[in-house]
Amino acid sequence: MHIAEGFLPPAHAIAWGVASAPFVVHGVRSLTREVKEHPESTLLLGASGAFTFVLSALKIPSVTGSCSHPTGTGLGAILFRPPIMTVLGTITLLFQALLLAHGGLTTLGANVFSMAIIGPWAGYAVYKLLKRYEVPLMVAVFFGAFVADLSTYCVTSVQLALAFPDPSSGFLGALGKFGGIFAVTQIPLAVSEGLLTVLVMRLLVQSSKGELTRLGVLLQSKGTRPGTRTEKSEATEDAGAPGKPERNEATEAAGAPGKPEKSEASRTSETGASA
């Protein structure tokens, strides 16, 4: 996916840099606010950035001499929303360009636009749509990561087709060629990334449930559901129904409430009459 250093014409490189800049600035503000208001989220932010860095640094050979790799942006977009993931993705791409010769500084704007902007927003949109229809969390996470990965390569195909249109068929012909090249390896990679993201999310649910609840990934428990027996109701049932006096042993021995106990003389006369 990373477009190499100097590969794009200067006008295209500048245009993609200008298009990406507002998203990066907005993301920096969002990240600063998140760290200031919730410093405890720093560890999870670092883990999201590391996840993106490791996955997007893997170079898997594709056809015609190109290469493909996962992006890892779906996880951070789901956890912290796309603006923050834009900053994490930009930092990842910058370090890879400087340290790994993966991508480049002149093509940084184009790579940021495809991997750190469109990818996170597309994946997050699919994730939220599925959650709105009450799809299980892990299914929504899978498709969010899958779309974040695949949409990145779709945008890269558009960028390359705009820069290098086919001499005979123009932009559409070039788009078909670039998209076909990437699709061979990228669709299986997107599926693999979706499954890996689900695995990581399962681990986070077990280890960081409180943080995921604050971020809105997990729903906060709403207390006792209607019809659930509480301790108070169980105690009431043990004591008897409300409004009905408890029958004690003394009352039962004396007879039913409201009926006067017969005197000793009356019982004696009744015994004599029956005899």
Image: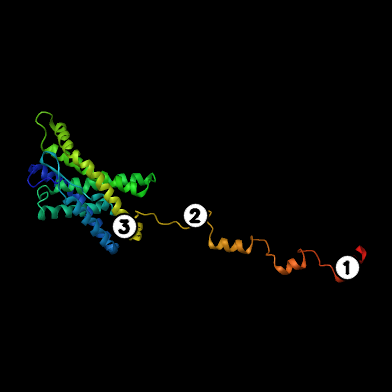
How far apart are the two marked residues, 1 and 3, measured between alpha carbons?
81 Å
Q: Residue at x 49, y 54 (%)?
A: 225
Q: Nearer the viewer, mark 3 or mark 2?
A: 3
Residue 79 sits in which quadrant?
Answer: bottom left
Q: Position of residue 46 (x, y in %)?
A: 23, 59
- Residue pointed to by mark 2: 225
**Tally of marks:** 3
Which disc, if any, is residue 204? Answer: 3
Image-based side of 171 in relation to 257, left or right? left
Give the residue furthest to the bottom: 264
Q: How is the image coloured?
A: rainbow
The amino acid beneath tag 1 is Ser
The amino acid beneath tag 3 is Leu
Q: Residues within 10 Å of mark 2 (few under 14, many from 20)?
A: few
- Residue pointed to by mark 1: 266
How far apart are the two marked residues, 3 and 2, measured between alpha carbons?
26 Å
